[in-house]
Image (cartoon, grey):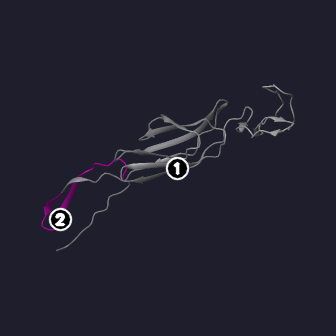
Amino acid sequence: FGTLGANITSYELTVNPGNKYKFRIKAVNTFGASDFSNETVYMPNTVPNTPENLTTTLTGTKLKLNWKDLADNESYFLIEWSQNDAAYSTFGTLGANITSYELTVNPGIKYKFRIKAVNTFGASDFSNEGIYTPPPTAPTIFTATPISENQINLAWKDNATNETAYYIETKVG
């Protein structure tokens, strides 16, 4: 990049918005050069890219969220959630470069999640929704009541709120 005079501790330069810059510095004299400093990264006034491919996977009562981090300048991720199609609310935040999170869920509840990357310049758009829809809760109090000699009435208590049909299995004998 360039050489600066001795005892200088800062330098101003013009950068292009949207470009990513990496800098490091070393001291030199007639006898040689020091090692390079740590590297610093700068992205002028750029909000992070939006996370993608948010998915949910259930194992037992543990729901795992996974996503693809497309940003390299986020400070943290903001996660929002919804239970049983209620309005979204803040679930929590996770540090930069994290791409998964696991939580315990309650049976019978539908969960929706969305995530965005945040830095000092703002926030990305929200990711796609990661949705977990639980299987229906089993019916109970299943009874067979005779109506006539060759007819019965089957009845049960409906404990589910998300069923689309019922399947009745029959076994003769």
Specify the farthest residue to the bottom: 173
Residue drawn at 42 percent across, 53 percent down: 58
Q: Which residue does the numbered mark 1 point to in the structure image?
A: 66
Distance from disc 1 to disc 2, alpha carbons, whole Å, reads 52 Å
Q: From which residue to which does the magenta span run?
A: 143-163
Q: Secondary structure at mark 2?
A: strand
User: Is residue 159 one of those drawn in magenta?
Assistant: yes
Q: Position of residue 26 (x, y in %)?
A: 78, 37
Question: Which residue is identified by label 2?
Answer: 151
Q: Relative to 124, is 130 on the left or the right?
A: left
Tag 1, which secondary structure? strand
Residue type beneath disc 1: Asn
Q: Judge whether residue 156 is colored magenta.
A: yes
The quadrant of the image that shows the N terminus is top right
- Mark 2, Cα crowd under 10 Å, few <14 / some 14-19 / many 20+, is few
Return the residue nearer the eye: 158 or 79. Answer: 79
Which quadrant: the C terminus?
Answer: bottom left
Point out residue 134 in the picture as x, y percentages from the top left corner.
39, 51
Task: Give the vertical position of 173 relative to 169 (above or below).
Answer: below
Residue 44 in the figure: left or right of residue 64: right
Residue 132 shows in the view: no
Nearest to the observer: residue 113 or residue 167: 113
Residue 79 on image: x %, y %? 52, 38
